[in-house]
Structure formats: C-alpha cells, structure tokens
C-alpha cells in the first residue's frame, strides 16, 4: 500500500492466491474507519470493493485497486488485464456466473457480485475489452 | 442475545475474541455461500457456516458481523484465527450440525 499526496491508496491484488483475496478491501475498511467515514458508507464501499477484488482474483488473475478520497466523493477503481467481459449486460444480471465449481466450493460464484457492486455504489462504470482487461470505477457520494 | 449466550446454547468453544462475548446480536445467518452473505445479509450479527477459509472472516468483516460460528466441529487455521483476532471478530466452533445450531438459536429467540 502506498499513500499519495491527494489521499489516494494503491493496492496490488495477487491473482495467484485465493487465500489472500480481499486483503486490500480489509485495509480500506480499516482506513475508512480511521478517517471517520460513517459506518454505513464504510460498509457499502467495503462490500462493493471486496466483490470487485474477488472478481479480479477469480476471473482475471489479479489486478490493481486504487481508492481516491475527495471531499464529496470516494472513488474505487479496479483494473485488471484479464480476459475481459464480452457481454456486460448479461454479466450484470443477478445469478449470471461463469465461475467454475471449484470457486463455488470456496463460497463464491453466485453471480451476485456485479449487481451487488451496482447496488452498493452511487455510480458504476465498466470498461472492458475482450482479451485486454476490465476496469471498473465505483463512485460513492460522501454525506 | 449476547454472544456468551450463543456459545452456551451451541456448546461451542470460543477460539478467539473471548473479550467480546458481551457483544449483542439480534439475528444470525447460516450459509456456506459467501456470495449470498454479501448479497443478502442486513443486520445479522452472527454467521454460522461449514465453510472454512479466510474469505469467511473477511466477508463477515465487510458485513459488520462480529461473530463466526463454525459448525460440525470445523476448525479454522492459525492464519484465520490470527486474521479474526486482528479485526476483532469472535470465532466459535460447535460440534452441532448447521441445522441443529440454527434451530437451537431460533428456539432461544434469536432473530424472532
Ligand atoms: N474482472 C473480471 N474479468 C473478467 N470477467 C469478469 C470480471 N468480473 C466479472 N466477470 C464476469 O462477470 C460474471 C458475473 O460476475 P459476478 O456478478 O461478480 O458473479 P460471480 O463472480 O459470482 O461469477 C462472472 O462470472 C464473469 O464471467
Ligand atoms: Mg463475483
């Protein structure tokens, strides 16, 4: 984790280690508590980011996560160089998942991640190119 | 219901967080699917599960659930216990099945 001047935080998300998946989100949750954000916003941000982080690990072999804290807005950007999402509209549907059985045995792959990220954020933007990767930006209004 | 009472009803061993047993939970959730927990839990303070991995602990942190009960005698790794300790999550382990664990807590009034 590196902290830059404008209060932003950068995390590398390891795609080879499911055990550590979610570490960045745990850190962000702790940081938000320390920075005095409301429990309600902290919960929304951390759930959405955790879903995105897990997705990068199980679908895209890892990536990077950046959190930008501004006065009236908190932004989480998750970027990977994985396979990309061919049909974003379908991927956004509740219950749609391409996760294999071994992922389901680990407790994930119900196809609720992307819908959850949309529900918990105020704005969600997905940019994805098949064969190149996916970038998801989540925006949360502060106050 | 206080977590100390939960431990008593489930005849559970407290593996970490014994200093937080005065925490109060108003409802619980039983699931092995963390995806479902992330999508559907509202203010349940306890997760009962038969799944054992670090994501269980992280999921409960994200959901602000302060307690995990592993059913059927499942025991978490040292690493998971250390993670829970670090974030202040209570971990218990009971020999009871998921069905009986949920049933006992429900009968005792939790979540009703
Ligand atoms: N970062 C990603 N890279 C590639 N595909 C993704 C990514 N995130 C999500 N997907 C695709 O979108 C689908 C739906 O995602 P999600 O709603 O999180 O469900 P789940 O992760 O349980 O499969 C995934 O099954 C996968 O096919
Ligand atoms: Mg997902």
Image (cartoon, rainbow, N blue to C red):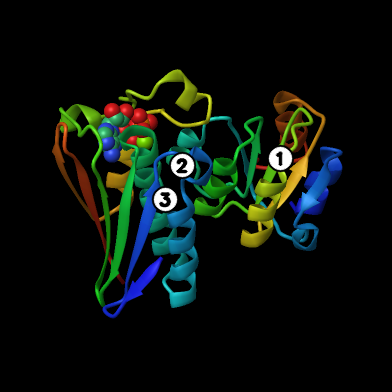
Residue B38 image label: 2
Q: Is residue A94 visible?
A: no
Label 2 Cα crowd, 10 Å radius (few <14 / some 14-19 / many 20+) = many
Circle 1 chain = B
Quarter of the rendered structure image containing ligand 2: top left
Q: Which residue is mark 3?
A: A47
Tell me, yes or no, whether the two marked residues, 3 and 1, touch with CB atoms within 8 Å.
Answer: no
Tell me, yes or no, whether the two marked residues, 2 and 3, touch with CB atoms within 8 Å.
Answer: yes
The local secondary structure at tag 3 comes to helix
Residue at 60% x, 38% y: name it.
B53
**Image coordinates for residue A45, horizontal then vertical, percent:** 37, 57
Is B72 situated above or below B81?
Answer: above
Circle 2 chain = B
**Image coordinates for residue B44, horizontal then vertical, percent:** 58, 46
Find residue A35 and report its image quarter.
Answer: bottom left
Quadrant into which the N terminus of chain A falls: bottom left
Q: Distance of mark 3 from mark 1, alpha carbons?
A: 23 Å
Residue at 79% x, 31% y: name it.
B73
Q: Distance of mark 1 from mark 2, alpha carbons?
A: 20 Å
Q: Which residue is mark 1?
A: B76
Residue at 29% x, 80% y: name it.
A5
Which of the two residues, A40 or A105, is positioned nearer the viewer here?
A: A105
Q: Is residue A130 visible?
A: yes
**Image coordinates for residue A69, horizontal then vertical, percent:** 29, 71
Q: Nearer the viewer, mark 1 or mark 2?
A: 1
């Amino acid at each position: 984790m590196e902290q830059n001047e404008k209060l932003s935080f950068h995390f590398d998300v390891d795609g080879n280690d499911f055990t550590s998946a979610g570490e960045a989100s745990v850190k962000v949750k702790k940081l938000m508590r320390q920075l005095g954000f409301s429990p309600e916003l902290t919960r929304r941000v951390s759930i959405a980011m955790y879903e995105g982080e897990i997705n990068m690990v199980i679908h895209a072999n890892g990536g990077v996560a950046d959190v930008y804290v501004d006065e009236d807005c908190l932004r989480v950007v998750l970027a990977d160089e994985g396979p990309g999402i061919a049909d974003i509209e379908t991927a956004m549907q509740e219950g749609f998942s391409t996760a294999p059985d071994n992922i389901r045995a680990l407790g994930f792959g119900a196809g609720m991640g992307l819908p959850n990220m949309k529900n918990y954020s105020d704005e969600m933007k997905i940019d994805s190119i098949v064969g190149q990767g996916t970038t998801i930006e989540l925006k949360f209004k502060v106050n | 219901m206080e977590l100390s009472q939960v431990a008593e009803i489930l005849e559970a061993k407290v593996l970490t967080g014994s200093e937080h047993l005065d925490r109060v939970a108003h409802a619980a959730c039983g699931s092995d699917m963390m995806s479902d927990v992330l999508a559907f839990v509202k203010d349940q303070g306890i997760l009962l599960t038969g799944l054992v991995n670090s994501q269980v602990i992280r999921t409960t942190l994200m959901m602000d659930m302060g307690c995990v009960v592993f059913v059927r005698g499942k025991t978490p790794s040292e690493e998971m216990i250390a993670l829970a300790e670090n974030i202040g999550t209570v971990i218990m382990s009971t020999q009871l099945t998921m069905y009986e664990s949920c049933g006992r807590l429900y009968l005792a009034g939790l979540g009703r």
